[in-house]
Image: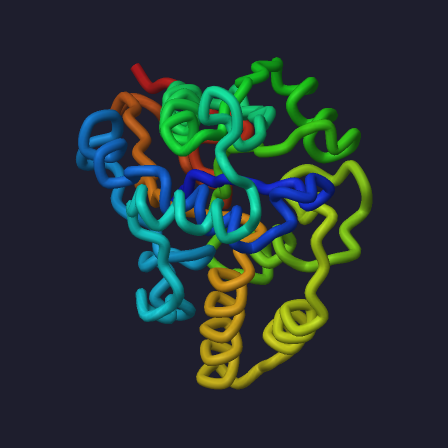
């Protein structure tokens, strides 16, 4: 599974307010975007662990943020960010990853959606190196969006998006300026727990806390699809599937 993300920079006082992050989530009509731009290869996400992970998926009974424009506006007002001249509350810079067309479309949809609740968004597009440097090293972003590629076990590549103490500049890790001791603990406990039932319960608690605090929102789950000729040999033979090295790929006659 490959969830689409919205990553929040907590160094912006507006985004450090949980009400603003929840308002941003409520302001975006995700089902509309999926239906009109992604189709059958995507569905609503429910958190950082997708349903395809049957060993760890806790179900959808965790905090969710369905489209509700009125609620988004009410949360922004409650947070003290009233609409000023021209209806503007504050503006944001959004950096989309350059990995795929869907991310570019998603960034434009975020921009349009937030504009409707008084948050103008400047979309800043970079090449791969520029995106990784500005988001994960320079922290020169307000919002960022890209993919999280789920790797079958949450300890492998998922919890690093949420645990504090990640090395500065490490891509696809918690570089948001956000720290939560309770989430750090449940992440560490789950990584070292050997009882599968207890471990699944710990990851259920992790998802609940992550969806509540919302340092990263993963509202869309896409399905990995690889289309390749039947003549290809040694394809999809690594844990990264089609996005891995093709050093031993060859074509039969």
Q: Nearer the viewer, residue 47 or 156?
A: 47
Residue 167 at x, y percent in the picture: 81, 47
Q: Is residue 97 left or right of residue 14?
A: left
Q: Is residue 58 above or below residue 113?
A: below
Foreground of the two, 237 or 220:
220
Count of numbered marks:
0
Residue 218: % across, % down: 44, 47
Q: Is residue 90 visible?
A: yes
The residue that appears at 50% across and 42% down in the rendered structure is 148
Residue at image position (69%, 18%) is: 130
Where 122 falls versus 27 (above or below)? above
Depth order, front residue of 40/105:
105
For the point 58% across and 16% down, the residue is: 124
**Side (left or right) of 24 relative to 8:** left
Q: Position of residue 51 (x, y in %)?
A: 32, 59
Residue at horizontal 31%, vertical 42%?
Answer: 69
Q: Quadrant of residue 104?
A: top left
In the rendered structure, the answer to whether residue 42 lies left or right of residue 131 reads left
């Amino acid at each position: 599974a490959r969830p689409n993300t919205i990553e929040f920079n907590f160094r912006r006082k507006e985004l450090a307010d949980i009400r603003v992050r929840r308002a941003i989530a409520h302001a975006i009509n995700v089902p509309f975007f999926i239906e009109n731009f992604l189709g059958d290869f995507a569905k609503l996400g429910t958190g950082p662990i997708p349903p395809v992970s049957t060993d760890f998926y806790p179900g959808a009974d965790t905090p969710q943020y369905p489209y509700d424009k009125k609620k988004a506006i009410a949360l922004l007002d409650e947070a003290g960010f009233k609409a000023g001249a021209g209806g503007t509350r504050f503006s944001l810079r959004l950096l989309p990853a350059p990995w795929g067309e869907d991310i570019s479309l998603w960034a434009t949809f975020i921009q349009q959606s937030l504009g409707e609740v008084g948050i103008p968004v400047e979309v800043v597009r970079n090449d791969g190196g520029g995106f990784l440097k500005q988001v994960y090293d320079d922290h020169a972003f307000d919002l960022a969006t890209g993919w999280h590629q789920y790797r079958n076990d949450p300890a492998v590549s998922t919890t690093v998006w949420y645990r504090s103490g990640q090395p500065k500049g490490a891509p696809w890790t918690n570089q948001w300026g956000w720290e939560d001791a309770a989430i750090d603990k449940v992440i560490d406990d789950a990584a070292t727990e050997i009882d599968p039932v207890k471990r699944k319960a710990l990851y259920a608690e992790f998802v609940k806390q992550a969806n509540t605090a919302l340092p990263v929102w993963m509202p869309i789950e896409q399905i990995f699809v690889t289309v390749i000729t039947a003549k290809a040999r040694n394809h999809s033979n690594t844990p990264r599937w089609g996005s891995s090295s093709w050093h031993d790929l060859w074509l039969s006659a």
